[in-house]
Amino acid sequence: MKTTFFTQCRSILLLWLTQALSSLGSAMTNFALVVWSYGQYGSALTTALLTVCAYAPYVLLSIFAGALSDRWDKKRTMLVCDSLAALCTLWVLGLLVAGELKIWHLYLNNALNGLMNTVQQPASEVAVTLLTPREHYQRMGGLQAFSRSLVSLLTPAFATALYTLVGLKAVIFFDLGTFAVAAVCLLCFIPFPPTTEEEKAPEPLFAAAREGLRYLRENRGILDLILFLAVINLTASMFNAALPALLIPKGGEEALGLVQTVTGVASLAGGALAVAFPRPKSRVRVICNSLLFAMSTENFLLAFGKSLPVWCVGAVLGWLFIPVMNANMDALFRETIPPEVQGRVYSARNTLQFFTIPVGYLLGGVLVDRVFVPFMAAQAADSLWVVFFGAGKGGGAALFFLVIGLFGVLSCLPARRDRHIWGLEE
């Protein structure tokens, strides 16, 4: 059985392995640039805008990306997009070596990388389908989930170690090296099935986008669940924007790296739980309860915690059941949405569900820098605010995490009573 899997899936396994390695390099660069920018400017808003710029093209254009990917050669699309992203990273390295790197260069770099990722992602998803035998879809999906969790786990530790010991240039060199390995393997060693010549006239882009939106409008349960997840993404992105402002002033760059490493471990364990658990009686209950548990634990431990062990416990509790939630949400969508319209519906879903991510990063950065940090700076050293949350920038971010926790818990309650979402169980 194992021999059959490895012999039948040799090409897709090589693609999966090399793309996962390249993803690790890219994630390490992104992490190191966040640390560098916070060290240079000391602003949560400045670092949050890095993610805003990366997500903006994805949100604006993903509704059309599926249709574009269907028209273009998948292998060529992946190579071109990855190569252009690598050129952008090389440009950043050149500016860094010359001592001319500024924050606006990173904003432009992230925006261009986000644009490349918007087009590359659907092409790579289709590539997995083309290269994987149907009987191995589930196993391949499990490997992809595993590699994503492993990248999340390794990125903070590897990036922090390399950045601290050698510097930002070393992290970027590692990123470019992993890209080269992935590109050479994709170009030379991974044959794609020949494209068939029955070229049906492709559906116009706007018509494809309208089809996905029409389906959501007619299926309120799916639409309400997507909008609920959009609110959760808003909370999660405010969380991510404020996390460096909390941990770096209170515990240093090593604290940020360790907490994110623990987050990766928890996600990895959660992925194992998602595979091991049998199908639940109610997927909707698992989704709602997992998110409510995450929102009601980590945010409050980060807000009131004053030591690294407490922050790490919060990371475990906040992220352990997120893969379980994602697995059940994905299964619920696949069971409910007809396969013939899934691509268009998923494109519409990406726009509606993820547009709150750049909004949340921007909002989180503004609120921490302009509202919560100045508020805490105005408090007396013996005030209850300082006693509970600490002084300085870290104290302002800690107070913000209390607000995030309350908002997250309250946002979960309406979804638990939404009859349209519960109707998906039928």
Image (cartoon, helix red, strand yellow):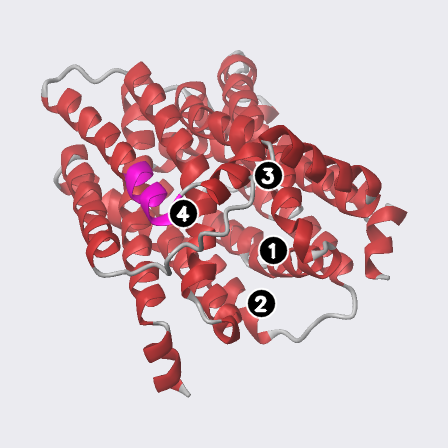
User: Can you say which quadrant of the picture contains the N terminus?
Assistant: bottom left
Q: Secondary structure at mark 1?
A: helix
Of 25 and 196, nearer the camera is 196
Residue 87 visible in rendering: yes
Of 334 and 228, nearer the camera is 334
Q: Are marks 1 and 4 in contact (CB under 8 Å)?
A: no
Q: Position of residue 64 (x, y in %)?
A: 55, 33
- Label 3 and label 4: CA atoms lie apart by 25 Å
Q: Are marks 3 and 4 in contact (CB under 8 Å)?
A: no
What crowding class fits label 1: few (fewer than 14 Cα within 10 Å), some (14-19), or many (20 or more)? Answer: some
User: Can you tell which of label 1 and label 4 is closer to the viewer?
Assistant: 1
Q: Position of residue 95 (x, y in %)?
A: 16, 20
Residue lying furthest bottom: 1
The boundaries of the magenta stretch are 73-82
Which numbered dot is residue 260? 4
Q: Amino acid at mark 4?
A: Gln
Task: Identify the residue at image location x=29%, y=64%.
Answer: 14
Q: Are marks 3 and 1 in contact (CB under 8 Å)?
A: no
Residue 215 appears in which quarter of the rendering?
top right
Q: Earlier in the sequence, mark 2 or mark 4?
A: 4
User: Can you tell which of label 2 and label 3 is closer to the viewer?
Assistant: 3
Which numbered dot is residue 350? 3
| On screen, residue 46 above or below 212 | above
Which numbered dot is residue 326? 1
| On screen, residue 418 above or below 143 | above
Q: Earlier in the sequence, mark 3 or mark 1?
A: 1
